[in-house]
């Protein structure tokens, strides 16, 4: 068999199932480039390492598809890396928005309690009703109502179509209204 270093990416990719060292060679060739590419975008080495590992795992899992696509292994590998980076930032934004919304709700309930307002029951009911929603519905409500994103922005953040986001927003809004009415809050 030919020296691994002398073989093309596509030759190595075609032989992965028969040659245990073929993917190792592709990993050796591109690991440094991929981790630098990702680290320049996320600026956290631990996260860059995780995303690089996920990139190679996904690429390995899709190895048969790569041979049939134009652009070859390298283009596919960096395309996967870009997708992983977008997902990383989408997840970070959702975590930040959820944390900010929770902090705001807790602070508002605390202020209402200190002022002797009966709004604390409203906040408790709202929190309970939000917790009854699915994670995606809760994210949409928080992004839309607390953070002020448009449904179009939310569709991009979540990686879902605008129609899906709109439908889930309406479903979440209806669930919240029903739940709050059961708690004696609202109309």
Image (spheres, rainbow, N blue to C red):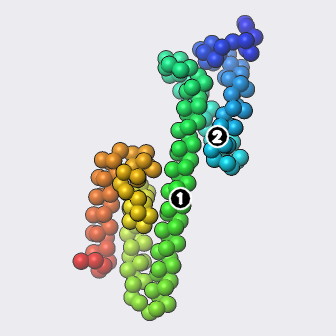
Q: Depth check: 100 or 25 in front? A: 100
Residue 122 vertical position relative to residue 12 in the rendered view, above or below: below
Q: Specify the farthest residue to the top.
A: 1
Identify the mark at residue 113; answer none if there is no mark: none
Q: Report if the CB atoms under discs 1 and 2 are less than 8 Å apart.
A: no
- Callout 2: 10 Å neighbours few (<14), some, many (20+)? many
The answer to whether residue 74 of the structure is visible from this angle is yes
Residue 146 % position (x, y): 42, 67
Q: Specify the farthest residue to the bottom.
A: 116
- Quadrant where the N terminus lies? top right
- Residue designated by label 1: 95
At 69% from the left edge and 12% from the top edge, which residue is drawn? Answer: 7
Residue 14 vertical position relative to residue 137 in the rendered view, above or below: above
Residue 139 % position (x, y): 43, 58
- Callout 1: 10 Å neighbours few (<14), some, many (20+)? few
- Residue designated by label 2: 38
Residue 112 % position (x, y): 45, 86
Residue 13: image quadrant is: top right
SS at circle 1: helix
At 33% from the left edge and 60% from the top edge, which residue is drawn? Answer: 172
Residue 161: image quadrant is: top left
Residue 151 % position (x, y): 35, 54
Horizontal side of 41 relative to 21 (left or right) equals left
SS at circle 2: helix
Horizontal side of 131 relative to 177 (left or right) equals right
């Amino acid at each position: 068999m030919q020296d691994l270093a002398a073989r093309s990416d596509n030759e190595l990719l075609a032989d992965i199932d028969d040659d245990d060292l073929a993917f190792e060679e592709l990993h050796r060739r591109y690991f440094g480039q991929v981790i630098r590419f990702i680290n320049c975008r996320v600026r956290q080495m631990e996260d860059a390492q995780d995303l690089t590992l996920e990139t190679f795992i996904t690429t390995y899992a899709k190895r048969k598809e790569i041979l049939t696509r134009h652009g070859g292994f390298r283009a596919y590998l960096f395309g996967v890396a870009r997708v992983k980076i977008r997902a990383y930032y989408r997840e970070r934004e959702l975590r930040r928005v959820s944390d900010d919304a929770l902090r705001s709700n807790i602070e508002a309930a605390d202020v209402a309690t200190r002022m002797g307002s009966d709004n604390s029951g409203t906040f408790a009911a709202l929190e309970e009703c939000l917790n009854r929603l699915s994670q995606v519905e809760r994210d949409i409500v928080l992004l839309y109502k607390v953070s002020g994103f448009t449904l179009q922005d939310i569709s991009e953040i979540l990686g879902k179509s605008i129609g899906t986001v709109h439908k889930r927003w309406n479903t979440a809004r209806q669930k919240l209204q029903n739940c709050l009415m059961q708690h004696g809050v609202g109309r």
